[in-house]
Image: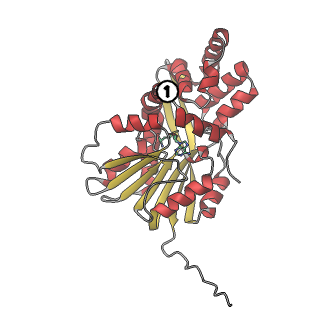
Amino acid sequence: MTNAGMPGSAWSAGFASAPRSAMNVYAEVMVPRMFEPWGRELLGELALEAGEAVLDVACGPGTVTRLAAAQSGPAGRVTGCDLSPAMLAIAQGREPVADGAPIDYVEAPADRLPVADESFDVATCQQGLQFFPDRLAALAEIRRALRPGGRIGIAVWKRIGECPPFAVLGEAIRAVAGDGLADRYAGGPWGLPRADDLRALLERAGFRDVQVEDRVLPVTFEGGPEQLAGTLAAAGVAGELEALSPQDKDRLRDAVAELSRPLMDDGALRSQLASHLAIARRRRHEPTRRRVACAG
Ligand SMILES: C[S@@+](CC[C@H](N)C(=O)[O-])C[C@H]1O[C@@H](n2cnc3c(N)ncnc32)[C@H](O)[C@@H]1O
């Protein structure tokens, strides 16, 4: 069963057409506070070695891509793929990684990766899988791109309730704009929350030695509820929120401030985020397909 028609797919389409201004919010507000620390955690699990070739799928503005380039060094090679031209433009506009592997950015959907078979040692996909319209096809593509024995590392958020700042945003949307929009918000990034589903997807795509772990990392929005609410500009429901009346926009801002109160500490919003990290391998020896001879 594919993910087509589900909130994650709608977010995927939203990323594909997102304006650069919205993705700048992602890159400037969310990457340093959330995605870079989580990227380090993911790469730590993969124990990247100097000289390895890395494929970063749904690379966004190059978050894990750049960390991987730093770790694999000048003898390595990194390719970042994403379907969002705005994300890729930001990635390409960043300064080169000092003493890092060369990076090649490619615009492509995750289920049609324009890369050669068995050409990477490691693949990463941080907070991307939940959005893919066909998650299994994307994982099969990543497996094709890995050499036999190659490693994959995937990060996918747990339930939105375990990511309290974003639960605040979801509940504020629910209060002001109703269940439909709130569910489309939460069903995007937090739409693949069960470890068993993640494990089953990886196993069905042919990966072995699948390990799924729970992780929690702190997060701080030093700019408080206003800074947190600003992240909605990069959300898959940004268009619907932008279309709210001025009164409803005020109500949304007030609701975020009110619901954030328990997370406030000395002027900053301090909380935590919970994610699954899954690590697996492509088999070292693929079973050879038996040819059935047809008589006649
Ligand atoms: C939450 S961002 C994560 C970006 C990056 N991995 C990071 O850690 O910052 C999700 C990314 O998935 C990308 N994405 C969504 N659907 C996709 C698809 N079907 N194929 C490729 N990329 C996709 C988006 O464009 C976006 O850059």
Q: Is residue 265 visible?
A: no
The residue most toward the bottom is: 295
Residue lying at 53% horizontally and 58% vertically, measured from the top left: 141
Q: Is residue 121 above or below residue 23?
A: below
Residue lying at 52% horizontally and 31% vertically, measured from the top left: 18
- In the picture of the structure, the residue carrying the numbered disc 1 is 22
The answer to which of 159 and 231 lies nearer the viewer is: 231
Q: Cβ(mark 1) to ligand 1 < 8 Å?
A: no
Q: Quadrant of residue 122?
A: bottom left
- Coloring scheme of the render? secondary structure
Q: Is residue 222 above or below residue 96?
A: above
Q: Quadrant of residue 96?
A: top left
- Other-residue count near label 1 (Cα within 10 Å), few / some / many at <14 / 14–19 / ≥20: some
The answer to which of 209 and 92 lies nearer the viewer is: 92
Q: At which x and y percent is residue 25?
A: 47, 27
The answer to which of 74 and 16 lies nearer the viewer is: 16
The residue most toward the right is: 179
Q: Is residue 1 visible?
A: yes
Quarter of the N terminus within the rendering: bottom right
Q: At which x and y percent is residue 239?
A: 61, 24
Q: At which x and y percent is residue 288?
A: 55, 79
Tag 1's secondary structure? helix
The residue most toward the front is: 296
Residue lying at 71% horizontally and 18% vertically, measured from the top left: 176
Q: Amino acid at mark 1?
A: Ala
Q: Is residue 119 above or below residue 270?
A: below
Quarter of the C terminus within the rendering: bottom right
